[in-house]
Image (spheres, rainbow, N blue to C red):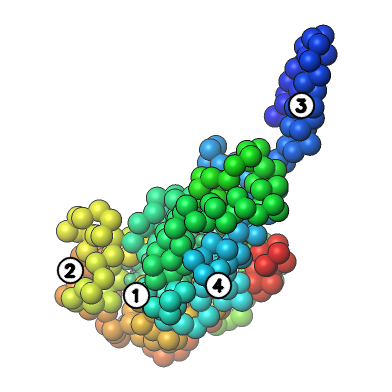
Amino acid sequence: MKKNIFYLLITFVALIFSCSKDPVITISNNVIDTPAVLFNLNTPVGFPKINIPASNLLTVEGIALGRKLFYDPILSLDNTQSCGSCHNQKFAFTDSTLQFSKGITGEIGNRNAMPIMNLAWERAFFWDGGSATLEDQVIGPITNPIEMHETLPNVLRKLNADATYKKLFKRAFGSDSITTKHIMKAIAQFERTVISANSKYDKYVRGEVELTFDELKGMELIEDQTKGDCFHCHVLGSTFTDFDFKNNGLDSVFTDLGRYRVTLKETDKGKFKTPTLRNVELTAPYMHDGRFKTLEEVLEHYNTGFAENSPNLDVNIALGKKGRMSEIEKQQIISFLKTLTDYDFINNPNFKKP
Ligand code: HEC
Ligand code: HEC
């Protein structure tokens, strides 16, 4: 529809100019040569509708460019590290089994790398939600001294000196000069397409496969308020998160203040973004600081380990009776969590290094 109007306009402009003496038709040709083609991102069955910001509509060229940038170490100071170095598709885009990622200088951070998956639905980014949009989020890792440690002017200089990138940015955004905004937009476009929605659980929801007895039991226990009681935060169904920030009782004294760092509200101390449970079998270690190596440890935390005296502890954790889950029940919950592993996602050729 939009494209039709666009071509109509071009024809109209060409018509006007065809009456004048100047053969400006070449300008229109340039535009016709390089229209970015809008990309229609389908909402998977059972998911809320995806809202793509009007200021950064998805295009085939924008997504392809974002994917190339995501995997290109050119964004780091010494050209050795890309986003993909810490966000590895095999591990649902987390950093293998590392507790903390290493930046280009070998320095480590204090937070566990988060998966890149189903971010089109998220409302804030990083463990503390420190970035309000996916576009803004892109700058953090590039300039962070313990990550890619590069400056934006330097990145722009490198990209603008690269003939291939000049061409690709021009195709995606129609501009001759590469800007920071374009980099942010392209990577965010790619990230929005990185969707996991074809796990065994999804196939079960679509009526394509059956779950085993233990898997079904695990799903029930997650919703059982006297047992797992996980669903208040890791909402069952599609995204497996409430998109909120909660204190799930990891500490009674905080070393990382979490959401408080962003809002400076006393009531946000020790709260972190509720992560999705999708592909959780592949994203160990767990929690913002990667303190738990296995899902068994995670379950034991919710069963007996949570700090009852933690400030701002979520009420649903506080109400949980310690020792409420048996060994078998914990295993059944884990069996269910493993149905959320999406092998098509981790092998999807569209998300691989181009
Ligand atoms: C050195 C390793 C490293 C590199 C390189 C890296 N990241 Fe990350 N990424 C992390 C860590 C660690 C976190 C969690 C940080 C936090 O919460 O403070 C994270 C978080 C994120 C998140 C937030 C996800 C969510 O659910 O909120 C996104 C998106 C992301 N990274 C994208 C990128 C992009 C894009 C690049 C490249 C421009 C990149 N990362 C480079 C380690 C890395
Ligand atoms: C009060 C909300 C809440 C409840 C209830 C809750 N969680 Fe969580 N969960 C969180 C938050 C918040 C985090 C991240 C905490 C952090 O890293 O500081 C988390 C982290 C996790 C992680 C680690 C994910 C990762 O990527 O590191 C797993 C696995 C998990 N929860 C499973 C469960 C299970 C299973 C239950 C039920 C037995 C449960 N949760 C109940 C809020 C909750």
Badge 4 is on which residue? 80
In front of the other: 23 or 102: 23
Q: How many residues crowd around disc 3 within 10 Å: few (fewer than 14), some, or many (20 or more)? A: few
Badge 3 is on which residue? 28
Q: Is residue 187 above or below residue 148?
A: above
> Going from the N terminus, do you reach mark 1 or mark 3 first?
3
Badge 1 is on which residue? 110
The amino acid beneath tag 3 is Ser
Left or right placement of residue 231 versus residue 260 in this view: right
Which residue is at a point 35% across and 85% down the rendered structure image?
A: 300
- Which is more foreground, mark 1 or mark 3? 3
Location of residue 172 in the rendering, given as x and y in whole percent from the top left corner = 66, 44
User: What's the mark number on residue 311?
Assistant: 2
| Alpha carbons under labels 4 and 1: distance apart | 21 Å
- Which is more foreground, mark 4 or mark 1? 4
**Element class at badge 1:** loop
The amino acid beneath tag 4 is Thr
In front of the other: 338 or 328: 338
| Alpha carbons under labels 1 and 3: distance apart | 52 Å
Q: Are marks 1 and 3 in contact (CB under 8 Å)?
A: no
The amino acid beneath tag 1 is Asn
Q: Is residue 224 visible?
A: no
| Alpha carbons under labels 2 and 3: distance apart | 63 Å
